[in-house]
Image (cartoon, rainbow, N blue to C red):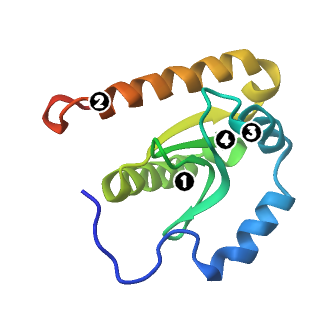
Amino acid sequence: MKKRVDYQLNNRREQLEQRRHLRSNGTPAEAAMWKLLKNKKIMGLQWRRQFSVGSYILDFYCPSLHLCIELDGEPHYTPEGAEQDKTRTEWLLNEYGIHILRLENHLVFDYPQSVIAEIELTINELQHLNSLPPSEYSL
């Protein structure tokens, strides 16, 4: 269930420069992923880059599905990185119903068609879940 807040939680002004910096200075994997997602190339869905929710900035976010794609590089493969990812994933899901699809950076370069297939599979699963009454679904 979404909680009501009395202040803007998404794309807050104080994060504007940080989001701009991340968009302008993203990783090569993020640039390659954006080429796959922009202009509604995957299933006609609109995506946003570096969209913030609370204190987190999401790599790619589809507002209509509450789906986030995170590209993971080396820092995510440490115990600390894994714990941070877990905390972030739980918070986004519990507070906002945002599902996270995590992909390794190298997959975007090495297997772009597999990345697209994985995104489409996740989209189909979420669309199916969204069509069910809340008491009948779980991930």
* SS class, disc 4: strand
Mark with earlier residue (3, 4): 3
Look at the numbered disc 2 and give the secondary structure of its residue: helix
**First of labels 2, 1 by sequence position:** 1
Look at mark 1 in the image and give the residue it sits on: 80
Residue occupied by mark 2: 131
Q: Disc 4 and disc 2: Cα gap in Å?
A: 28 Å
Residue lying at 86% horizontally and 60% vertically, measured from the top left: 24
Q: Earlier in the sequence, mark 1 or mark 3?
A: 3
| Identity, as a three-letter code, of the amino acid under mark 3 | Asn
Label 4 neighbourhood size at 10 Å, few (<14), some (14-19), many (20+)? many
Q: Position of residue 94 (x, y in %)?
A: 31, 54
Q: Which residue is mark 4?
A: 71
Q: Earlier in the sequence, mark 4 or mark 2?
A: 4
Image location of residue 90, percent across then percent down = 37, 51
- State left or right for residue 121 relative to residue 104: left
